[in-house]
Image: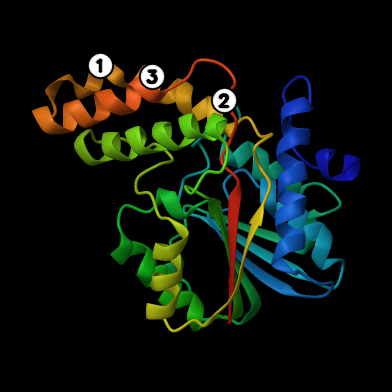
Amino acid sequence: MDHLLAAMKILGDDTIQRTQLKHRIDLVEAFGIQDGMSVIEVGCGQGDTTVALADRVGESGRVLAIDIAPPDYGAPITLGEATSSIAASPLGSRVEFQLKTDLLDLRDDRFDVAVLSHCSWYFRDPDQLLLILKKLRCMATRICIAEWDVNYTQLSQRSHFTAAAILALYSEFVENDGNIQHLFDSQQLRHLLEEAGWNVAETTTVAASYLQDGAWEADYARSVQQAFSKVPPRIRSLVGSFYSLLEKEEITSLDSIVILAE
C-alpha cells in the first residue's frame, strides 16, 4: 500500500487516505482485474480507485481514467492536483487521465474491463446512467460497478442511508453539484445493466463499515437542513423524519455492493 500512497497527493497525516485506499484495493480484487488488462474507469475523481487499478494491471496494462468534472473541482485537493501527482509517479505510465470529459463524446475504443467505482449516485437520473452503460457495452468486454449498498445490515449504518436519502432529496429540490444526485440500489443497477445489453454474472458485498464516508455524509446532510424550509410540506415532513434518525455518534458506513456483468 505504501507505494500507492506515495503516488497520491496527501495533505497532512495519511490515515484517512490509507483507510480509503484499503477499500479500493478490496474492490479491485472483487472486480477480478488481472495483469495486462486494459481498463476504462468512469468517474475517476481524485484517483482513489485508479491507483489500485493501475497497480493491478501491471506494466503491460493500461487504465484510461475519465471524469466529467474540471481540474479545479474538489477541496482541499482538486482533481487536477490529485491526478497530476499520480501521473508524475511510477504508476503514471500506466494511466491516462482525461478530466472534463463526457464518456459519450469519446470514440469507441476497446477495453477488457469498464469500471464505475462509487460514482453512479452522481448521475441525475436513470436515463443518464443508462446511456453510459450502453456506451460502455460497445467499448468493454466486462463491466464492474461498485456502489454503496442501501440494504444496510447494521443499525449503525442507518445514518449513512438516511443522510444519503436526505441529500438525494436535496438534489431534487435544491440545485447543487453534490456527490449524491440520485440513489440507485443494487436491483436498479442490475435492471439498468440488463436494459443496456449486459448479462449480470455476479453480485457480491465488500465490507466498508470502517470507512469515514457515513459520518461525512451525515455531517453534510446536517449542514443543508435549513434549505428544506421552502420545499413542499410533505417532502419537508419526510425529510424531518430522516433527520430524526440521524445519529451524532457511532455512525458507520454502508457496505459496498459489487456487480459484475459481461
Secondary structure under the numbered disc 3 in the rendered image: helix
Q: Where is residue 101? Give x, y as percent.
A: 47, 58
Label 3 and label 1: CA atoms lie apart by: 9 Å
Using residue 221 as the reference point, say whether residue 52 is left or right of it: right
Disc 3 residue crowd, few under 14, some 14–19, many 20+, Cα 10 Å: some
1 vs 2, front mark: 2
Q: Amino acid at mark 2?
A: Ile
Indicate the secondary structure of the residue bearing disc 2: loop
Disc 1 versus disc 2: distance between alpha carbons? 22 Å
Number of residues whose C-alpha sits closer than 10 Å to that of mark 2, classed few (under 14), some (14–19) or many (20 or more): many
Q: Which residue is mark 1?
A: 226
Q: Give the quadrant of the N terminus.
A: top right
Amino acid type of the residue tagged 3 in the rendering: Arg
| Quadrant of the snapshot with the C terminus | bottom right
Q: Quadrant of residue 225?
A: top left
Query: Disc 2 designates what residue?
Result: 251
Going 22% across and 33% down the picture, which residue do you hit?
174
Disc 3 vs disc 2: which is toward the camera? 2
What residue would you read off at disc 3?
222
> Does the residue at mark 3 contact the one at mark 1 (Cβ under 8 Å)?
no
The one nearer the camera, 170 or 140, is 170
Say which quarter of the image contains residue 57.
bottom right
Instruction: Give the total of numbered labels.
Output: 3
Kind of residue sitting beneath label 1 = Gln
In the image, farthest residue toward the left: 232
